[in-house]
Amino acid sequence: MKSRITTLLILFGLLMAMPALALDLHSARNAGMVGEKVDGYAQALNATPDVQALVADVNAKRQQEYARISKENGQPIDVVAKLAAQQIVTNLGAGASYQTSDGAWKKK
């Protein structure tokens, strides 16, 4: 009985910790797993399935937002995305990776 309770407590603790283990963009950037491209989209620098899924989700949401802003302002989506890229890079934390206009990768 005692080992059953211990096992249940361990499982409960693991389940409670699951949300903390979820990968988010900020954490992935800080860990060097995701970089910001010059075109306004993220890129997986560490090609694990979790990182690739995160990047795909982030980029899909960005594309929707860029399309909305593009429509509102009468600007092509790529122009909106490149302007956003400048803001994203400006706001990156120390150590985050970003792509320069010549395609090279640097850390902030």
Image (cartoon, grey):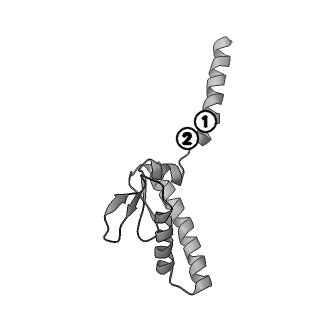
- Badge 1 local density, few (<14 within 10 Å), some, or many (20+)? few
| Quadrant housing the N terminus | top right
Position of residue 77 relative to residue 100, above or below, is below
Closest to the observer, 94 or 6? 94
* Residue most extreme to the bottom: 74
Q: Residue 13: which quarter of the image?
A: top right
Q: Say which element carries label 1.
A: helix
Position of residue 29 relative to residue 18, above or below, is below
Closest to the observer, 63 or 2? 63
Q: Position of residue 79 (x, y in %)?
A: 47, 80
At 41% from the left edge and 50% from the top edge, which residue is drawn? Answer: 32
Q: Is residue 15 left or right of residue 39?
A: right
Q: Position of residue 38 (x, y in %)?
A: 41, 69
Position of residue 82 relative to residue 5, above or below, is below
Q: Are marks 2 and 1 in contact (CB under 8 Å)?
A: yes
**Mark 1 sits on what residue?**
17
| Quadrant housing the C terminus | bottom left
- Badge 2 local density, few (<14 within 10 Å), some, or many (20+)? few
Q: Residue 101: which quarter of the image?
A: bottom left
* Residue most extreme to the top: 2
**Mark 2 sits on what residue?**
21
At 55% from the left edge and 41% from the top edge, which residue is drawn? Answer: 21
Q: Say which element carries label 2.
A: helix
Type of amino acid under label 1: Ala
Type of amino acid under label 2: Leu
Q: CA distance from mark 2 to mark 1?
A: 7 Å
Q: Position of residue 84 (x, y in %)?
A: 51, 71
